[in-house]
Image (cartoon, rainbow, N blue to C red):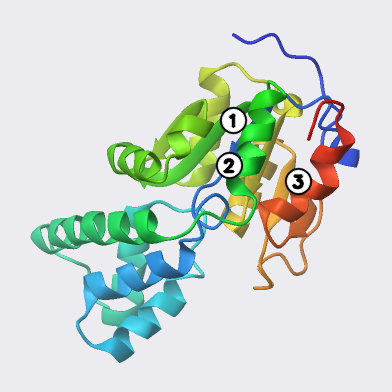
């Protein structure tokens, strides 16, 4: 295990005391939220109008796994639950569609530079996503983000809260030396549950209105980096 020192939690977000940065992927490292929403619409319907409705609903589903999103979309728009074969077919469609959307989407503003800077500062860089690991690894290689991350952790049939808790437990990390950067209320819930200081990313969607107890929201990683990383000796 890495030798960590105690941090000061969210207060002041003193990155001189932070040793691990954990990043959500969609909307934080890759600007793929809208593309993924459209992929979900295409997985369910060939009708462009229905696809748009599904995409809009999808964007409200944050911090939950893909399987739960599929079931929520089915229940909201079509009522009857998917049969086992229908569910498998939808899942397989999403593998291809999501891979296309995430490999084709641009990195968020400042993403590569900030990950590189954190590496120079010896801060461990983690990608934590609800996207299944095999698929996520392919996407990260295509985006060349695997070269800028220390650990890539994909999801399963569980919410982000459980993913973050499992990760902390596996590496025996003190939450106080970590920071979690996410763009949804599900990410914020995961941070609160595990007591990890949270940085909110929100490009003017109002996702975190009425919420508190976090750093931000910032429009992009670049805005967070400009405010926080420049306070650290050795950052350039």
**Badge 1: how crowded within 10 Å, few (<14), some, or many (20+)?**
many
Of marks 1 and 3, which one's residue comes earlier in the chain? 1
Residue 154 in which image quadrant:
top left
Q: Nearer the viewer, residue 194 or 144?
A: 144
> Can you see residue 109?
yes
Secondary structure type for disc 2: strand
User: Could you tell me which secondary element the residue under label 3 belongs to?
Assistant: helix
Give residue 116's position: percent from left, percent from top: 62, 34
Q: Residues within 10 Å of mark 3 (few under 14, many from 20)?
A: some
Residue at 36% across, 59% down: 104
Q: Is residue 117 above or below residue 17?
A: below
* Left or right: 111 as drawn, with respect to 120: left
Give me the residue at 45% from left, 53% from top: 64
Q: Residue at x 57, y 56 (%)?
A: 108
Q: Which residue is mark 1?
A: 125
Which numbered marker is on residue 225? Answer: 3
What crowding class fits label 2: few (fewer than 14 Cα within 10 Å), some (14-19), or many (20 or more)? many
Instruction: Give the side of residue 69 with respect to residue 94, left or right.
Output: right
Residue holding disc 2: 23
Q: Are marks 2 and 1 in contact (CB under 8 Å)?
A: yes
In the picture, the quarter occupied by the N terminus is top right
Residue 102's place in the image compared with 155, above or below, is below
Q: Are discs 1 and 3 less than 8 Å apart at CB?
A: no
Secondary structure of the residue carrying numbered label 1:
strand
9 left or right of 107 in image: right
Of the residues under marks 2 and 1, which one precedes in the sequence? 2
User: Is residue 63 positioned above or below 165 on the image?
Assistant: below
In the drawing, does residue 120 fall left or right of residue 133?
right
């Amino acid at each position: 295990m890495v030798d960590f020192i105690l941090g000061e939690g969210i207060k002041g977000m003193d990155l001189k005391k932070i040793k691990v940065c954990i990043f959500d992927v969609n909307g934080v490292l890759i600007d793929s939220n809208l593309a993924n929403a459209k992929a979900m619409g295409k997985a369910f319907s060939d009708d462009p109008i229905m696809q748009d409705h599904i995409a809009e609903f999808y964007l409200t589903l944050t911090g939950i796994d893909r399987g739960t999103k599929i079931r929520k979309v089915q229940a909201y728009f079509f009522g009857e639950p998917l049969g086992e074969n229908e569910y498998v077919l939808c899942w397989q469609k999403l593998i291809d569609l999501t891979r296309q959307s995430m490999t084709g989407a641009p990195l968020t503003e400042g993403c590569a530079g900030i990950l590189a800077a954190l590496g120079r500062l010896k801060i461990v860089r983690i990608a934590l996503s609800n996207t299944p690991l095999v698929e996520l690894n392919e996407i990260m290689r295509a985006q060349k983000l695997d070269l800028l991350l220390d650990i890539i952790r994909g999801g399963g049939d569980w919410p982000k809260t459980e993913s973050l808790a499992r990760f902390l437990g596996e590496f025996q990390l003190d939450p106080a030396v970590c920071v979690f950067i996410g763009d949804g209320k599900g990410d914020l819930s995961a941070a609160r549950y595990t007591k990890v200081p949270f940085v909110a990313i929100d490009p003017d969607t109002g996702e975190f209105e009425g919420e508190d107890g976090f750093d931000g929201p910032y429009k992009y990683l670049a805005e967070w980096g400009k405010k926080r990383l420049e306070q650290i000796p050795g950052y350039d």
